[in-house]
Image: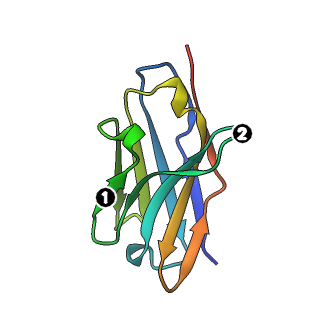
């Protein structure tokens, strides 16, 4: 049974930083692409950043230069370092594991609120 447990959400002021982590269990973590998505109230869920099993990354234009995605193969975790936060980054953030043949899995989501 695959489980994804997210942590690190919370509140920050504009310009501040938060670090999200996603701990995976019950599967071969290293073969999956790890993605972070977010969903703001009234909006569709959108991809924020992703990192492939080989370490290739891609980012939404809105977070380039501010967010950094990484993964720790030994700890089976995916991380999202968020710097220079803006109010428009406020959303529920979801961790995702995806594999073209094994399907995908979602975490439960963690709230990120950026306000002064």
Quadrant in which residue 51 is drawn: bottom left
Q: Position of residue 110 (x, y in %)?
A: 62, 44
Q: Which residue is mark 2?
A: 42
Q: Position of residue 29 (x, y in %)?
A: 44, 73
Q: Secondary structure at mark 1?
A: strand
Query: What is the residue that sits farthest to the bottom in this orientation?
Result: 101
Among all residues in the image, which is located at the extreme right? 42
Q: Is residue 102 above or below residue 60?
A: below
In the figure, is residue 32 to the left or right of 7? left
48 shown above or below 113:
below
- Bin the neighbour count of mark 2 within 10 Å (Cα to Cα): few under 14, some 14-19, many 20 and up: few
Q: Residue at x 60, y 74 (%)?
A: 2
82 or 45: nearer the viewer: 45
Left or right: residue 95 compared with residue 16: right
Q: Is residue 102 above or below residue 39?
A: below
Label 1 crowd bin: few (<14), some (14–19), many (20+), radius 10 Å: some
Q: Position of residue 75 (x, y in %)?
A: 39, 63
- Disc sitting over residue 16 in the figure: none
| Residue visible at 59% across and 57% down in the picture | 5
Would you name the residue on which mark 1 appears? 57
Determine whether, in the image, residue 46 is placed left or right of residue 67: right
**Residue 106 position within the rendered picture, expressed as x and y whole percent measured from the top left:** 61, 63
Quadrant of the drawing holding the N terminus:
bottom right
Number of residue marks: 2
Work out how far the residue at label 2 is from the one at label 1, CA to CA, in angstroms.
28 Å
Disc 2 or 1, which lies upstream in sequence? 2
Q: Label 2: state its secondary structure.
A: loop
């Amino acid at each position: 049974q695959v489980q994804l447990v997210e942590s690190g959400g919370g509140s920050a002021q504009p310009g501040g930083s938060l670090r999200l982590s996603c701990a995976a269990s019950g599967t071969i973590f290293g073969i999956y692409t790890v993605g972070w998505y977010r969903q703001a109230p009234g909006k569709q869920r959108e991809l924020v950043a992703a990192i492939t099993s080989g370490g290739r990354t891609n980012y939404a234009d809105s977070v380039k230069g501010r967010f950094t995605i990484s993964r720790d193969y030994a700890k089976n975790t995916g991380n999202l370092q968020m710097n220079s936060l803006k109010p428009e980054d406020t959303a529920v953030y979801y961790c995702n594991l995806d594999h073209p043949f094994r399907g995908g899995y979602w975490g439960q989501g963690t709230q990120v609120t950026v306000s002064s």
